[in-house]
Amino acid sequence: MLEVSGLSKRFGHFPAVNQVSFNLRQGEILGLIGPNGSGKSTTFNLIAGAMRPSAGSIRFEGAEISGLPAHKVCHIGLARTFQIPRPFRRLSLVENVALAAHFGSSESIAESEARRRAENALETVGFSSMKVSTEGLGAAALKKLELARALATQPRLLLADESLGGLDHAEMEHAAAMLETIRTRLGITIIWVEHIMGLLMRVVDRVIVLDHGEKIFEGLPEAAAKDARVTEVYLGHART
Amino acid sequence: MKDEVIRRLGPLLLAVLGLAFVPFVTSDYVLHIAIQILLWGFVYTAWSLMGKFGLVSLGHGAFLGIGAYASPLLWNYTGLTPWLGIPIGILLAVLLALIIGYPCFRLRVVGHYFALVTLALSQVALLTIVAARDITGGSLGMTPKAVGHSWYALQFPEKPYFYAIALVAWAFGLCIWHLVDLGKGRAALEAIAEDEGAAASIGINVMREKLRVTVTSAALTALGGSLLSQYFMYVNPDTLSGIAVSLQIVFAAIAGGMYSVFGPTAGGLFTIALPEILRISLGTNFVGAANTIYGALLVIFIIFMPRGIIGWVESRLAAAPAR
Ligand SMILES: Nc1ncnc2c1ncn2[C@@H]1O[C@H](COP(=O)(O)OP(=O)(O)OP(=O)(O)O)[C@@H](O)[C@H]1O
Ligand SMILES: [Mg+2]
């Protein structure tokens, strides 16, 4: 469904993402892991059209999408969340998500339909009360809002930048369970960025490990845990 | 939806009905002031369409100037009726809005930088008008050839005619304000004002939304400019273009309250009536003082009533216990 090849992004001379290639199958949950600054969020920014790649190609369902503006990438069925939540604070919770439902698809939909999709998305991520302002939402709730907003655009592929720092154990378990639900119930393919390995390993089908912008491993989670380079690079960082 | 339309259009309809009677009960002098308030209120409303979404333009003097000059120039030199001259002026203003808006939005020029770029625009417009003095009369201004009462030339020596035109234009401006403020368009612009990247990520075409509101605002401003010049039968670069006019527009819209539909009009009332009252009560010796007082008051408004006069009244009404 997604074919990334030779993807690179340099900031000045600094290679944040360097010659990364991978394929993603329909219906899969792919874990994208790596220590701080290894290029995970940048990879998402490139795929989602928030940044232009310096080199490489990104094909989504057979069509080249690298260099497309972000709103077009969204319209063709690819949604993303931000690592640090970016809610629209002047809008209410439902308005945030309804806006995504409205503009997220290229065909225009009625206000009532947008609202219905928004309420569905909020329910999926576990918001019970709809009449909330974005004022005073905690870290976990803001993460959920990010996810709901992305889901409301009715994507086929979800890029979830869920470095779940700042959440407690129960909240992280909940988030992991939610991603599984999104895959099985809504049939959405997912790339999940995370730097806490343990939690992710139980949920994903495959992992890719980045280090200094380069892909150093691709395979099954069990194999990653045993891979010498991964344990050295990744766990070495994690311990610090 | 229906309730919403009634809720929004009700007060406007009442205001128009009430104002429609003004010509029957007052003097030409009051009408003269009222016409200016309505036309400037219309221009300030046009500006606030952008201003309330954080697109603080200091270039509206340019759009106003283009509108103000296009139809008199075409009338004097080619005999083209203002009925065509005004749309041409609007078209030129729209073109200019696109020329300045597109690169600004593409390069993500926002906030103070956007204000500065557009500030330059208004001065360029003023300097262009002055430089082309052979055609435009330069700083001395120019007068459209007068033909007396004429629908074709859009010239009416009798005040009630222009009062009616100003009232219709003003009501039209407020309708557009409501249209922009309704539903998803407003929410999209709010989202863009807060975070363009996040807005784009949920499928909002940031460029298109910003250009749309910019073009709308510029077109209405040019229309306001052309009606002002048709009414005064005189155009002058200092009163209808340039930085001073741009600042006047910004101050008035903010002082009146750019987040409320009647706010910019209140700004018009304030900026047109106040100097007039001061002039009458303090005499012509204090013409300079009027401007100073007016300027000082505006500063006070901006500091103590950031949502403007109408915004302040609204928050008072909301805070008052319901009986
Ligand atoms: N806009 C930018 N300009 C310059 N450098 C950047 C920019 N964005 C990211 N970088 C740099 O690129 C590198 C990769 O950053 P990125 O955010 O992709 O890492 P990450 O894997 O998501 O890290 P984390 O786990 O902390 O979220 C970092 O060194 C970062 O400082
Ligand atoms: Mg990151």
Image: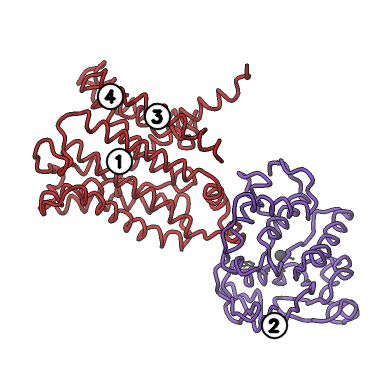
Judging from the image, mark 1 belongs to the subunit labelled: B
Q: Is residue A240 left or right of residue B127?
A: right
Residue B100's image quarter?
bottom left
Q: Colour of chain B?
A: red
The residue depicted at 64 percent of the width and 56 percent of the height is A101
In the rendered structure, are the residues bearing label 3 and label 4 in contact, judged by CB atoms less than 8 Å apart? no
Q: Is mark 1 within 8 Å of ligand 1?
A: no
Label 3 amino acid?
Ala
Residue placed under numbered mark 4 in the picture: B289
Colour assigned to chain A in the rendering is purple
Do tag 2 and tag 3 residues touch (Cβ < 8 Å)? no
Please provide percent x and percent y for residue B186. 53, 47
State which chain disc 4 sits on. B
Other residues around mark 4 within 10 Å, as few (<14) / some (14–19) / many (≥20):
some
* Residue in the image at 72% along x and 72% along y: A38
Tell me, yes or no, whether dots 1 and 2 are on the same chain: no
Residue that mark 3 sits on: B266
Q: Nearer the viewer, mark 3 or mark 4?
A: 3
**Residue B235 drawn at (x, y percent):** 18, 42
Question: Residue B38 location, x and y as percent?
Answer: 32, 32
Residue furthest to the front in view is: B2
For residue A73, side relative to residue A163 (left or right): left
Up the image or down, A66 lies above or below B138; here it is below
| Whether labels 2 and 4 share one chain | no
Question: To which residue does mark 2 refer?
Answer: A21
How far is disc 2 from disc 3 in space, using C-alphas? Answer: 60 Å
Q: CA distance from mark 1 to mark 4?
A: 19 Å
- Is there a contact, CB below 8 Å, between mark 1 and mark 2? no
Sequence-wise, the earlier of marks 3 and 4 is 3
Instruction: Identify the residue under disc 1.
Output: B245
Which quarter of the image is occupied by the C terminus of chain B? top right
Q: Is residue A66 above or below residue A132?
A: below
